[in-house]
Each structure stands twice: as C-alpha cells, then as structure tokens.
Amino acid sequence: MTVTEGSVLARLDNTTERSYLALAEVQAELDVTKAEADSLGARIANQREQVVVAGREINVRRTRTWRTPSSARRSGAWPSRRTPSRER
C-alpha cells in the first residue's frame, strides 16, 4: 500500500463525543427547567402566604368594625381619644 498526498489513512469516530455532547445539552436543559420549576414553586408558596396574611388582615378589620359603635362610625369620631383627668 502506498501513501499518497490526500490519501485517507484513518477515520476517527466521534460518535461517543457526540453522544456526550447531546447528553450534556439535555442535562443543561433539565437543570434550567428544574430551576424554573423551583422558582415557580417558591412564588406559589409566597402567594399562598400573602393570601393567608390578607385573610388575617380582613378578619382584623372586620373585628374592629364590629366593635365600633355604629354612631361613631357614621360620625367619624371613632376611636375617641380620652385624655386622663389630672387631679390637683
């Protein structure tokens, strides 16, 4: 066998390297997707907590309204400020 200029002496197989590259790309996509899912989960948990806090705020305001005499609510005089009398 004679080797001449431009002759193919060997063929390199990069099948394994292409497989590793494809696997790395898929892994990167999975990592991004997992990070996005974790972020959304945290946002959902935060929103749920905000709903709980808002519900508690509503209950506090309802309780204050129920305890306020209706005449005071209409006149805007609630809550009344009582100043302690000073004894001399």
Image: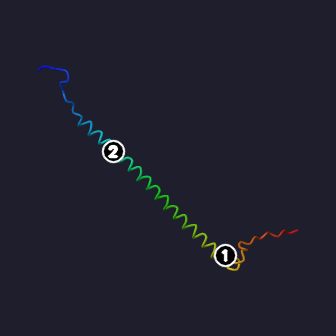
Labels 2 and 1: the sequence-earlier one: 2
Q: Is residue 82 left or right of residue 73?
A: right
Quarter of the C terminus within the rendering: bottom right
Residue 78 placement (x, y as % from top left): 71, 73
Q: Residue at x 32, y 41 (%)?
A: 24
Q: Which residue is mark 2?
A: 27
Q: Nearer the viewer, residue 50 or 4?
A: 4
Task: Specify the label residue 68 is tagged with.
Answer: 1
Q: Residue at x 80, y 69 (%)?
A: 84
Q: Nearer the viewer, residue 85 or 26?
A: 26
Above or below, comparing residue 11 to residue 73 in the picture = above
Above or below, comparing residue 4 to residue 24 in the picture = above
User: What is the crowding at mark 2: few (fewer than 14 residues within 10 Å), some, or many (at least 20)?
Assistant: few
Residue lying at the far front of the rendered structure: 5
Above or below, comparing residue 31 to residue 70 in the picture = above
How many tags in the picture?
2
Amino acid type at circle 1 is Thr
Q: Nearer the viewer, residue 59 or 88?
A: 59
Residue 52 placement (x, y as % from top left): 52, 64
Pair 2/1: label in front: 2
Coloration of the structure image: rainbow
Residue 4 placement (x, y as % from top left): 17, 20
Residue 5 placement (x, y as % from top left): 19, 21
Amino acid type at circle 2 is Gln
Secondary structure of the residue carrying tag 1 is loop
Q: Is residue 77 left or right of residue 13?
A: right
